[in-house]
Amino acid sequence: MKRAELDRAASEAADFVKGQFSATPRFALILGTGSNQLADAVSSETVIDYGEIPHFPRSTALGHRGRLVCGQLANQPIVVMQGRFHLYEGYPRERVTLPIDMLAQMGTEFLFVGNAAGGLNPAMATGDVMLIESHIDLMFRPPWAGDPGQAVPTSRRTDPYDPHLLASGLACGRHHDFPVHQGVYAAMLGPTYETRAEYRMLRRIGADVAGMSTVPEVNAATRHGMRVLGLSLITNVASPDAPQATSGEEVIEAARAGAPKLEAIVLDAIHRNS
Amino acid sequence: MLDLYDKIQDCVQSIKNHWDRQARAGIILGTGLGCLVEKIEVQATIEYGDIPHFPKSTAISHKGRLICGELRGIPVIAMEGRLHMYEGYSLKEITLPVRVMKAMGADLLVVSNACGGLNPYFALGDIMLIEDQINLMGDNPLIGINDDRLGPRFPDMCEPYSHELIEKALGVAREKDIVAHKGVFVAVSGPNLETRAEYRFLRTIGADVVGMSTVPEVIVAAHCGMQVVGFSIITDMCLPDALHPVNIDEIIQTANEAEPKLTELVLGVLPDENER
């Protein structure tokens, strides 16, 4: 899709959603694998299946439902993406980030991006939360690959993650007495889980967790000037020297157990910025 | 993506017209496994061009055919002529033959390659059992909608190469006095060889050897639940601080000299006739 086509697609999608949810969602939340219960915290006014929204791809991923929950969280209008799109599903990067373009057109200023991630840092435990301080893009899928002239250079060289949201998220963990880490998210193309050798590589190059999402959306949000908080739920901790098999189902179960912590951090961030 | 299943069935049907047997193992005859063909009691030879959906061999510089027969009494399908990403094939095309081997009954995949040695303890002509891999090709053959009939959405990769077979091969190597290591293979897309800085980088991230093949096929083998044993022949040494320009004749000569050793190891790890 060309830039102009994409802008039009995003604005048609935004118009469709605004037709059913008239409030301006200053806040938006992308739920990661297994975090569906976070959507239950929203007093929802409208639920829209992705299939109904013009130009939206369908989510094919395990543990993802594929719908937009629009309503109020902490008395603030919010749009929650329950299900997201991944590069490993075969979508080009600009399709994966179409919902972010749509949210920007709807007036979103704060984006909370959740994900389930594999921990690499041995100080982390399954069920812990890590707030993303920075990321490493190893997805090998630059925006607008194969479509030269369409890339929009961003002027920001600084990290896309908002330091104030990060600091208050860490404080929230202390207040509620649960461990919150900060660290580096390595974005992999997937869909294979990493080999032991790949875990060792990621650790050596400075990553704390690895996942298959988030970075495309965060880059798009940054381009739109949104303030971003990235939340990784550690669903397993890789131990390359004592390997254990990982299954998609286990990841979902671990994510489910950690969801209340994410909820506390998100609620706190909304309170502070209302 | 969901048409892949039907394509595999088409291929199987076409192969069965020439060779109607259950395979035990699939073999990708990479560099260094040329001699192995001579050990196969050939029952059918099928040009890639005669199998539906197989990449056409016109673009391949060498032979492109499937050899079906018996190796040490075991029914095998061997690929003579492998496809590489740098030739412009998609990873799905490159890995289709592996899926077909599996559909023909093979639950073991044997792969070999020629590679550059990064680990300074390795020497020209040594053989390395691939213990693990790093995918730096920038692509993955499983991208797209997953067909659950072929394998899981998120395949686990904690043991892509069978530890049991690695130990078996190393045992055979000791017995026959063949130098064999085990280590990490990193795959890059190529086709250019790496710079000195890239060799340092690959060594830093934990690789022992580097090559331009194997990883896509092994990912698909893991996806469809095959056991894998992988052999690398170190055909040039990539020591960044003592790097020589590559001499292709030397590489080919090194690979040829290592062939008999590799053949011994492959014959040694194959399952026994009666074992299932």
Image (spheres, coloured by chain):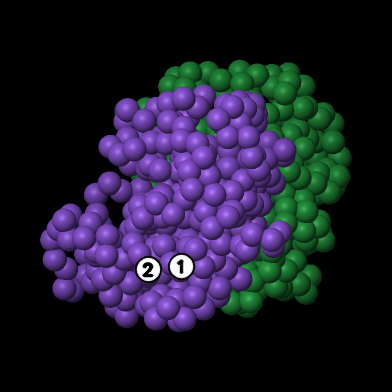
Q: What amino acid does circle 2 point to? A: Lys
Depth check, front residue: A11 or B156? B156
Q: Residue at x 82, y 29 (%)?
A: A46
Image spot of residue B54 (x, y percent): 47, 30
**Which chain is drawn using purple?**
B
Q: Tell how many labels.
A: 2
Disc 2 marks which residue?
B261
Q: CA distance from mark 2 to mark 1?
A: 6 Å
Q: Is residue B85 left or right of residue A122?
A: left
Q: Looking at the rendered structure, which numbered label has been put on residue B251?
A: none
Viewer-nearest residue: A139 or B109: B109
Give x and y (percent) for residue B206. Answer: 42, 71
Inspect the image, locate mark 1, and give the three-letter code of the amino acid beneath it.
Leu
Residue A192 drawn above or below residue A22: below
Q: Is residue B53 left or right of residue B234?
A: right
Q: Nearer the viewer, residue B101 or A161?
A: B101
At mark 2, the secondary structure is helix
The x and y percentages for residue A169 are 66, 63
Q: Using a 10 Å C-alpha cutoff, classify the residue at mark 2 as few (fewer than 14 neighbours), some (14 to 19) or many (20 or more).
A: many
SS at badge 1:
helix
Q: Picture coordinates of residue B176 (x, y %)?
A: 42, 78
Residue B265 is labelled as 1
- Camera sees residue A49: yes
Name the residue located 48 percent from the left edge and 63 percent from the top edge: B266
Q: Is residue B232 above or below residue B168?
A: above
| Mark 1 crowd level (few <14, some 14–19, many ≥20, 10 Å Cα) | many
Q: In this view of the protein, can residue B197 be seen by the observer?
A: no
- The colour chain A appears in is green
Tell me which residue sits at (32%, 76%) in the image.
Answer: B122
Q: Chain for mark 2? A: B
Given residues A83 and B202, the one toward you in this image is B202
